[in-house]
C-alpha cells in the first residue's frame, strides 16, 4: 500500500466541511496547479523549508551536509555566509536536526495510520459540540487510494464524520469503494474548458467531470469548490460555463463554495526554494468585483447553497449571508 507523508494535521478548521474539522493533509498530488497555495503538498517527497531570516550563518548545517548542498562561503568583509544549492540536496535532513535556530523545518512527516487516528479521536469533544469531524485532504488523498480507504474505514469505525477533499482525478474503481465511508466529498472544479484545464493543471477535465456525475447519480453528499484564479478562470464566459454546468445539478449538491485566489501561499514557494518557478509572483488577490459577478451569475441561474471562501463550517444561514455580504 502506498503510504503518504503528512504535511500537517490542522485543528479547528472551518473551511473543510461542517463544524470544527481536523484536517489531515497528505503530501502528493497528480495535478500541478500553478496557483496552488499549498505547494508543499504537491510532490510526495520529503522537503524542508529554509527560513533565511532565522539563519545565523553558524555553519552547523554545512558541517553535516553530505553532498555540498549547504556550504559556507567567506565574503569580502570576512563574514561567513551560508549558501544553499538545492540541486545537490538528497533530502537526508541532517541539516534540519543540526540547525539550532529553527531556520530549517521538515515538510512531510512519516505518521502511521494509528498515530493519525489517535490525533483525530482526541478532537472528538470539539466535533460533538460543533457537528464537525475529520477531513482527509492534501495534495490529493486519491493519489493514495488504498491508504485513504483504510483511513476512512477506521475513522468511521470511530463513529466520526469523514470528509474527503479531492480533485476526483483517478479511475472510478478507486473512488467507488469510498462511497460507504465518506460523509462529504469536497471536489474542486478548476475550469470547464478542457483545453485550459489540461494546459494549466496537467490533467484532462473529462474523467474528473465523469466522476463528479457518478457521485451525484449515486447520491453521494458532494460539495463543489470553485477556485477563481486571475486571468485563468475569471472571465464572464468562465462564470457562465459554471452556471450552465451547475444549474441543473445544484439541487443534488450539498453546496458550492467560491474560493477566490489569494496570495497566502507565496511565502511557501520561497521557503521551499521554488520561488523562481512560481508563476503567480506579485499577482494580487482577486478583486471583490469579480467575486460579486460570479456570485450574481450563479444566483441568476437559481443555484443554491452558495458560499464565498468555503465557510462550510458556519452552517447554512451564514453561508447565504456570506454571499450576500459580497453582493
Ligand atoms: S537535507 Fe540536503 S541540504 Fe540538508 S544536509 Fe541533507 S543534503 Fe544537505
Ligand atoms: S545550521 Fe541553521 S542557522 Fe546555522 S547556517 Fe545552517 S541554516 Fe543557518
Image: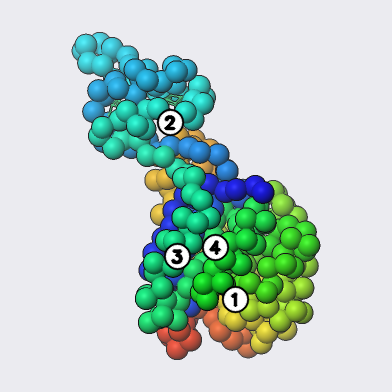
Instruction: State yes or no: discs 2 and 4 in contact (Cβ < 8 Å).
Output: no
Residue picked out by circle 4: 136
CA–CA distance in space, label 4 to label 1: 11 Å
The answer for how far apart the CA atoms under marks 1 and 3 are is: 16 Å
Marks 2/1 in contact by CB < 8 Å: the verdict is no
Query: Looking at the image, which residue is at 46% across and 55% down?
Result: 115
Label 1 element class: loop
Find residue 183 and name its label: 1
Task: Point out the tag, 4 or 3, that comes first from the N-terminus.
Answer: 3
Observer-nearest residue: 208 or 134?
A: 134
Nearer the N terminus, badge 3 or badge 2? 2
- Where residue 186 sits in the image (x, y, percent)? 59, 69
Looking at the image, is mark 4 or mark 1 earlier in the sequence?
A: 4
Task: Name the residue carrying label 2.
Answer: 93
Q: Secondary structure at mark 4?
A: strand
Front label number (3 vs 2)? 3
Q: Which one is nearer the viewer's eye here, 239 or 91?
A: 91
SS of the residue under disc 3: helix
Q: Nearer the viewer, residue 273 or 14?
A: 14
Q: Which mark is residue 283?
A: none
Label 3, on which residue?
120
Q: Residue at x 55, y 39 (%)?
A: 45
Q: How is the image coloured?
A: rainbow
Residue drawn at (39%, 45%), measured in percent from left and top?
Answer: 267
Neighbourhood count class around disc 4 (C-alpha, 10 Å): few under 14, some 14–19, many 20 upward: many
- Across and down, in percent, residue 283 comes to 46, 51
User: Alpha-carbon distance for marks 2 and 4?
Assistant: 26 Å
Amino acid at each position: 500500500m502506498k503510504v503518504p507523508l503528512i504535511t500537517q494535521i490542522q485543528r479547528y478548521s472551518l473551511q473543510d466541511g461542517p463544524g470544527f474539522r481536523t484536517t489531515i493533509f497528505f503530501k502528493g498530488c497528480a495535478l500541478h496547479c500553478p496557483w496552488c497555495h499549498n505547494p508543499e503538498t504537491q510532490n510526495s517527497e520529503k522537503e524542508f523549508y529554509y527560513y533565511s531570516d532565522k539563519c545565523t550563518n553558524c555553519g552547523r548545517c554545512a558541517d553535516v551536509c553530505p553532498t555540498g548542498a549547504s556550504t559556507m562561503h567567506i565574503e569580502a568583509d570576512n563574514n561567513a555566509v551560508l549558501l544553499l544549492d538545492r540541486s545537490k540536496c538528497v533530502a537526508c535532513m541532517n541539516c534540519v536536526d543540526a540547525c539550532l535556530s529553527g531556520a530549517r523545518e521538515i515538510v512531510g512527516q512519516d505518521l502511521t495510520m494509528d498515530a493519525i487516528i489517535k490525533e483525530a479521536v482526541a478532537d472528538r469533544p470539539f466535533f460533538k459540540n460543533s457537528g464537525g469531524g475529520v477531513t482527509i485532504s492534501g495534495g490529493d488523498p486519491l493519489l493514495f487510494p488504498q491508504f485513504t480507504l483504510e483511513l476512512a474505514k477506521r475513522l468511521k469505525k470511530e463513529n466520526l464524520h469523514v470528509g474527503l477533499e479531492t480533485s476526483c482525478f483517478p479511475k472510478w474503481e478507486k473512488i467507488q469503494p469510498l462511497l460507504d465511508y465518506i460523509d462529504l466529498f469536497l471536489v474542486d472544479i478548476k475550469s470547464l474548458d478542457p483545453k485550459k484545464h489540461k494546459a494549466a493543471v496537467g490533467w484532462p477535465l473529462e474523467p474528473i467531470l465523469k466522476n463528479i456525475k457518478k457521485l451525484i447519480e449515486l447520491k453521494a453528499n458532494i460539495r463543489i469548490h470553485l477556485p477563481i484564479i486571475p486571468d485563468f478562470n475569471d472571465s464572464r464566459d468562465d462564470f457562465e460555463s459554471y452556471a450552465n454546468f451547475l444549474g441543473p445539478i445544484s439541487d443534488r449538491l450539498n453546496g458550492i463554495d467560491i474560493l477566490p485566489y489569494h496570495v497566502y501561499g507565496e511565502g511557501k514557494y520561497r521557503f521551499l526554494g521554488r520561488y523562481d518557478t512560481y508563476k503567480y509572483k506579485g499577482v494580487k488577490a482577486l478583486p471583490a468585483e469579480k467575486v460579486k459577478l460570479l456570485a450574481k451569475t450563479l444566483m441568476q441561474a437559481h443555484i443554491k447553497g452558495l458560499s464565498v471562501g468555503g465557510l462550510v463550517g458556519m452552517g447554512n444561514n451564514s453561508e447565504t449571508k456570506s454571499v450576500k455580504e459580497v453582493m
